[in-house]
Image (spheres, rainbow, N blue to C red):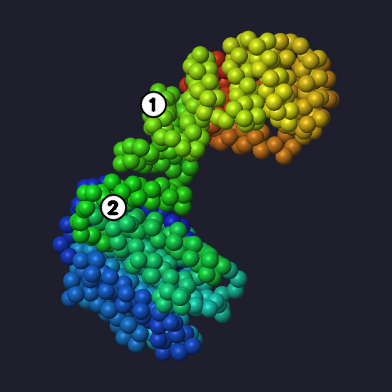
Amino acid sequence: MFKIKISVILSLFFISTFFLLSQDQLSKLVNSKNSWALIIGISKYKNVSMNLQYADKDARLFHDSLIKFGSVPKDHIKLVLNENANRESIRKYITGWLNSNSKKDDKVIIFFSGHGTQDIDDDNDEEDGFDEFIVPNDYDDNDITSAIRDDEFAYWVSKNKSENILVVFDSCYSGGAAKAKGLLNKKIKGEIKIDDFIKDIYRNIPKNNISILGACKANQISFESAELKQGVFTFFLVDSFKKESDLNFDHNLSLNEIFNVIKPKILKFTKEKFNREQEPVLITNKDDLINLIELPIEIDESKKSDIEKKSIQNQLNLLKVSGYSYIEILEKEVKLKEALVLADPENYEAYIDLGNYYRRNQEFQKSKKNYEIAHLILKNKSSFISEYYLSTVCQSLYELYREIGDINKAKNYLFLKNNYIKKSNQEEVSKYEKELGDLFFLENDFDQALTQYHLSLSKNKIQNEIYNKLAMTYIAKKEYDFAKTIIEKGFEINSNSKELQYLLSVLFKYVDNDQEKYEQIFNKYVENNSFYSDYLKNKKLLDEYLSIQGNEKSIIILLNNMEQKLIEGEFVIEIYIDYAKYCNKFGCHFDRSKNYLVRLKKFYPFLTIEKP
């Protein structure tokens, strides 16, 4: 007999993953002819010491919710509780009633709430040496064969003809705590083992038909809550069956949407109430995730915009715990923000965020457009908050135009920003003088830059950055002794200034040719310097990605990160030279990298820069 191994089904609490659906895929699933469901809940065990409080109630709640929200006909659903959920009856319901009635296009749901456990693998088909089991009502803890092994359960389910099977488990294998839906096996010592389920599922399931939703990871507990009077997982699962969970407005709740709604809620609740984390898990080998709930189409046009705004904001919040990579989150976030400004055209914060995103991504026209829309919206408002955001937008536009080399427009927005800040705020005025000095510096008007920097210093003597700017300007004028004097004054304000340490090390290396002092000071600069360590990590990732084909997008992101460090005003020679080298290796940004080398030569006129 061909045995299908799916330890994933009962050893499924290890990794979370989910997929987005296309409208065609959604339509295909919604239009399934029938739905069938087997709901199992065991609170009362033959061995009363194993009894749970709410597992049977979980099953009843899920059963009633499927009939109410899930469009499962009453005669297509079986509720099997307590003494009726023995080993043999569970087998018969799956292999007999469920498998004989359901067809290829039907939706099939199996729900189990009760105990799970582990035991030593006896046929050497588990890489970690352990099998997982669900525990029926008549389980004998002296006879592991009275439980239902993962391989066996998988074999029963694999005979089903449906291509849309969902298995839901509110159980776990980590016992030994109050309110835990898991039994400890005395033969297993140490931590709960984690099987490599991904290899198992792709190697052993013969068709693309299974999705599994589990209450927690392998080494966590599935809690019952006296406060909720339910299993925590099932409570939040059923609580998600409402229109607020419809994140893509298609009036269906897919596993993807439900999972993303319940995951942060369960994590938060269990951490607050039990001081332990319970993180639900979704595992699938399907490209088109099953729709669990079909919502009635009830749209109040007067509230449609508010619903859309709330739904988009929900999706943005869920991205933080989605499990997507950093790059994927950025891409999805910008799409949601673009949707948000369409639903809420007055949302100046979203426009600012989009401007920031496109600016980081070197899409300056899009960045400018979003900043300027935010500026227009804010000009028509009158409040302390709008003034704050106006100064923020003008600051961003100043920085954008400075980056692209349009110094005159940068000055205009800097003047506008100065009009929005409070003139009595000496710190803000000092910042304005410094930034104006930066623009004169970029125009090679070093004398005027020095004037502005000294004006800034006169209004606020306790600022680290201004000494760095002054020193850089004196170096650009080749007045190296003045630069050292400024650096010494800066150390009086902050003896651990990393920027000044770097500049002093550069002067010892390139001007004084004093290698010993250079190394001594440069090592102090590197020590506990998060900026420099971030740069080294970024460089290491670039080296790794350059050796792998198909990572162009990742390389562009990392190059942009490195370029951002240059834009932020860190005058570290190594970053400029490395940026040019990587651009040359990857074959991109030639003009920008060339301009940065010209800029570096202006900062440090004593440098001899070779072509990368």
Q: Is residue 589 above or below residue 382?
A: above
Q: Residues within 10 Å of mark 1 (few under 14, many from 20)?
A: some
- Assign a secondary structure to mark 2: loop
Question: Which residue is labeled 1 in the image?
Answer: 369
In the rendered structure, which amino acid carries the disc numbered 1? Answer: Lys
Work out whether residue 198 or residue 291 is closer to the camera in this orientation and state it. Answer: 291
Q: CA distance from mark 1 to mark 2?
A: 37 Å
Q: Residues within 10 Å of mark 2 (few under 14, many from 20)?
A: many
Q: Is residue 221 left or right of residue 255?
A: right
Instruction: Name the image quarter holding the C terminus.
Output: top right
Instruction: Name the residue beneath numbered marker 2.
Output: 288
Q: Check disc 1 and report its element: helix, strand or loop.
A: helix
| Image location (x, y in percent) of residue 565 | 59, 29
Q: Image check: 412 left or right of 529?
A: left
The picture quadrant where one finds residue 476 is top right
Residue type pointed to by label 2: Asp
Which of the numbered marks, if any, corresponds to residue 144? none
